[in-house]
Image (cartoon, helix red, strand yellow):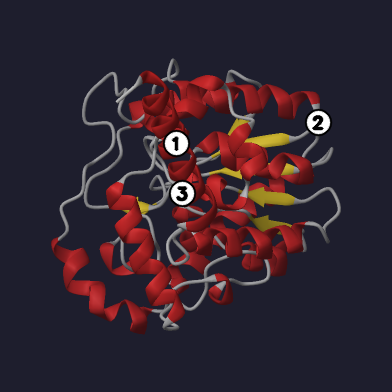
Amino acid sequence: MTIKKFILAALFSTLLYASLFLFVMHKPLTIGVMNDYYDKKIGYVETLRSPKLVILAGSNGRFSHRCETIELEHGISCINMSIAATISIDYQLERIKPYLGAGDMVYLPLEYGVLSKTVREMAALDDVPFTAAYDRKYFFNQPLERLLPAIFYFDLKFLISSAGEMALDRLGISRRFSSDTLTKQGDEKGHTLKKAEPYRRYLSQLEWGQPGLRAPVPEDMNVDADSARIVRDFLFYASDADITVVGGLPTLFDDRQVPESLVDSLAEFYRSAGHQFLVLEGFSQYPRSDFYDTPYHLSEPAQIRHSKLVGDQLARMMLAPH
């Protein structure tokens, strides 16, 4: 093969790869549902005026926190912008920035480990196929260190799973949860104790990794990590924009207590940047019987109880002078 033919073949292969994965293959059930979530949540946040409360985390934010309850209890406009922890924190923060205004409060009960990610680890998350399919402006505007891994993210496994999801979507197969199972404020709803019964035995036997087993705890909190730098930059941005950020703890099983040293490290991270940190009694840990299908997902009754406790504290913070 001549060099010219080799170059043409390489260019054709690259064009075919890009066309296939950027414009044809997608995952409507696992990735597309996130776009539906964003559409519904953004539709609601656009109707709200400042001051308002924004809750942002992974699926823990969606299942274990309920803006609907906080609105009813305190009359505070509230939007739950949480999607999933498989979307990197920088993308999640960028999506909410256009809808934040002076006087707003952002509550971040981020899952343990979010503040310890490297650029390489974040590049392997679901925001790559998500932005490639639904937010190409963001996809191509990423810095080179993120764009190159993103472009070559796709592989044969992704091709096969995409084809499977597209086929299931054509047949009308849907997931247990979708934008239809959200409240208008963006919270997950309908995950009742009755619906949790099939997962009861699984949760009772589930082995879970307790955060903060070692000190220091870089796997759960690392102030030098790329993701921590991204959140810190957001804290400075919020200060300049007269936005209050409150860090918080995600919900978790209570059979082993999260170490106070880890909680103190998280609190110091937010407070050192001029913001606040909320710690509930018991570190937001609850009996396994209160959870739905994972350690981060409270069932609906516990979600409402937890949200009342969180809402009481956040309402006081919003009403207090800066």
**In this orientation, which residue lies closer to the viewer: 104 or 9?**
9
Q: Give the CA distance from mark 2 to mark 3.
A: 41 Å
Q: Is residue 316 above or below residue 169?
A: above
At a point 38% along the width and 76% down the height, the residue shown is: 168
Badge 3 or badge 1: first in the primary sequence: 1
**In this orientation, which residue lies closer to the viewer: 102 or 276?**
102
Residue 249, horizontal then vertical, whole percent: 45, 43
Q: Is residue 237 above or below residue 284?
A: above
Q: Give the CA distance from mark 2 to mark 1.
A: 46 Å
At a point 49% along the width and 20% down the height, the residue shown is: 145
Badge 2 or badge 3: first in the primary sequence: 3
Residue under label 1: 14
**In this orientation, which residue lies closer to the viewer: 314 or 111?**
111
Quadrant location of the N terminus? top left
Question: Could you say which disc has been placed on residue 21 in the image?
Answer: 3
Residue count near mark 3 (Cα–Cα under 10 Å), binned few <14, some 14–19, many ≥20: many
Residue 204, horizontal then vertical, whole percent: 17, 65
Quadrant location of the C terminus? top right
Q: Say whether marks 3 and 1 touch (CB < 8 Å).
A: no
At a point 56% along the width and 28% down the height, the residue shown is: 231
The label nearer to you, 3 versus 1, is 1
Residue 203 in view in this figure? yes
Residue 55, horizontal then vertical, whole percent: 61, 50
At numbered mark 2, what does the secondary structure look like: helix, strand or loop? Answer: loop
